Amino acid sequence: MKRHFSLIAAVLLAFSVTLSAKDHNSDPDKYFLPYDRVPNSLTILPPPPADSSARFAYDREQYLWGKSLRDTPRGAQAVADATLGEQWVNEVFGEAFGYDLSHENAPRICRLIETLRHDAGDLSTRAAKQHYMRTRPFVRWNEPTATPSHEKFLRSNGSYPSGHTAIGWAAALVLAEINPDRATEIISRGYEFGQSRVIVGAHYQSDVDMGRVVGAAIVAALHADKGFRRQLADAEKEFRKISKNAAKKAAK
């Protein structure tokens, strides 16, 4: 019986390892990087703040700050930032970038940013999110968010670090590389995109701060990937064409 049980346990263990390996592989049509080339967020980041810590007291203070802005234009912007629609690259970064970043006007730039979104929002945060499964602030304090339609998903998804923030920060870093003349505006918008997560009540400030860390880490890793570098070169070429055409129109 003992031997029979050991055999069953071995089979179950092998099966669980297979599932884990499959779960942690990246879809090459969706991501730039395989999971084993992604900086490990669980290793990089400290644990979430303990409830008795000064860092958590700041999380609580920032949560209240965010609530105070929900009925303002900044709060409306935070709600808009929460939904990454079909033209999200343009909606979030177009004004800061200084040019139309729609699919029609900048397809290669959009393709680049929309692909790295998955590396940043999922792969860069996955290890820490799954390990800590930190409870969201709106769940902890049993209060509604400014984005009620998102709450069901958020309840089952770890809060630390913020995937939305990682997306916004990674996108801002790469867009600033493409258009360095607008780096200040682009990076500022990427920063505010992360703060929007605090305002709507979906994340603690520490989630957002660490989202920027892993967002930067994934950008560094992406620059070692041939596929990313190739698409980045295409995006830079497209931007030169866009800016040249804009200059011609302005000269007329």
Image (spheres, rainbow, N blue to C red):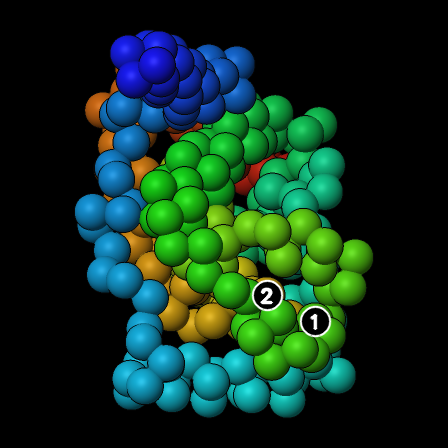
Measured as percent of width and height from the top left, residue 93 is found at 57, 50
Depth check, front residue: 82 or 27? 27
Measured as percent of width and height from the top left, residue 46 is found at 23, 61
For label 2, the crowd category at 10 Å Cα-Cα, with few meaning under 14, some 14 to 19 and many 20 or more, is many
For label 1, the crowd category at 10 Å Cα-Cα, with few meaning under 14, some 14 to 19 and many 20 or more, is many
Measured as percent of width and height from the top left, residue 243 is found at 51, 36
SS of the residue under disc 2: loop
Residue at x 72% of width, y 54% of height:
152
* Amino acid at the residue labelled 2: Ala
Residue at x 60% of width, y 42% of height:
89
Q: Do the residues labelled 1 and 2 touch (CB within 8 Å)?
A: yes
Label whose residue precedes the other's in the sequence (1 or 2)? 1
Measured as percent of width and height from the top left, residue 36 is found at 27, 24
Depth check, front residue: 246 or 68? 68
- Residue 238 vertical placement versus 181 (above, below): above
- Residue 231 vertical placement versus 98 (above, below): above
* Amino acid at the residue labelled 1: Thr
Q: Name the residue under label 1.
A: 145
